[in-house]
Image (cartoon, grey):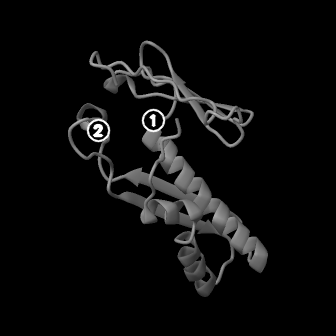
């Protein structure tokens, strides 16, 4: 954020070597918080709600984080159930953060910020046994995105 509170950064499409494969590219214009994201052949929009100064043109960054975790959890369960040939008909994963993130951007220059808990509910539909349901809930904890978040990671700066 600039001193005026406006986001004014653009992520580079490549790591400086001219190869943009594997990179997620995000750009924010001169005004507002809307971020336009390119992932392979897909376009995504990220924004903040109007109550935070955005235009609510898309989910917030934290909502995309929850989207990554929820979709990875559901996909992991689907792969496992299919491999075991279990009668899993539908998976619904509900996630929410433990607190609002609205003040994070305002305080990030001077203090550690971020959410510390994510609440999760998983609904499994189908004629599963109690043992299958228990095992699927264990497998949900093996989702690669969940493991990455819990293990933690560092962001490298490529110039």
State whether residue 88 appears in this view. no
Q: Residue 77: x and y, percent?
A: 65, 68
Q: Position of residue 44 (x, y in %)?
A: 61, 31
| Total numbered badges shown on the rendered structure | 2
Name the outermost residue toward the bottom.
131
Q: Quadrant of residue 140?
A: bottom right
Residue 53 position, x and y percent, is 34, 21
Mark 2–mark 1 CB contact (< 8 Å)? no
Relative horizontal placement of residue 86, taking residue 135 as reference (left or right): right
* Residue at horizontal 45 percent and vertical 25 percent from the top: 56
Query: Which residue is under mark 2?
Result: 104
Which residue is at the front of the view, 126 or 71?
A: 71
Image quadrant where residue 152 sits: bottom left
Sequence-first disc among 2 and 1: 1
Q: Residue furthest top?
A: 30
Identify which residue is drawn at 58% across, 84% down.
130
Residue 90: x and y in percent read: 67, 62
Crowdedness of circle 2 by 10 Å Cα count: few (<14), some, many (20+)? some
Q: What kind of element bears circle 2?
A: helix
Residue that appears at 29% across and 38% down: 104
Instruction: Write down the residue under mark 1.
Output: 60
From the viewer's perspective, tell me whether residue 43 is left or right of residue 1: right
């Amino acid at each position: 954020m600039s001193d005026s509170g406006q986001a004014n950064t653009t992520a580079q499409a490549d790591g400086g070597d001219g190869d943009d494969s594997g990179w997620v590219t995000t750009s924010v214009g001169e005004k507002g918080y809307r971020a336009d994201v390119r992932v392979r052949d897909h376009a995504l929009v990220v924004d903040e709600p109007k109550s935070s100064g955005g235009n609510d043109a898309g989910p917030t960054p934290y909502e995309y984080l929850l989207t990554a975790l929820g979709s990875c959890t559901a996909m992991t369960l689907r792969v496992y159930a299919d491999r075991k040939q279990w009668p899993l008909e539908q998976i619904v994963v509900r996630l929410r953060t433990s607190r609002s993130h609205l003040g994070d951007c305002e305080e990030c220059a001077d203090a550690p910020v971020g959410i510390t808990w994510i609440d999760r509910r998983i609904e499994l539909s189908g004629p599963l046994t109690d043992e299958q349901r228990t095992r699927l809930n264990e497998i949900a904890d093996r989702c690669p995105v969940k493991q990455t978040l819990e293990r933690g990671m560092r962001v490298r700066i490529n110039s």
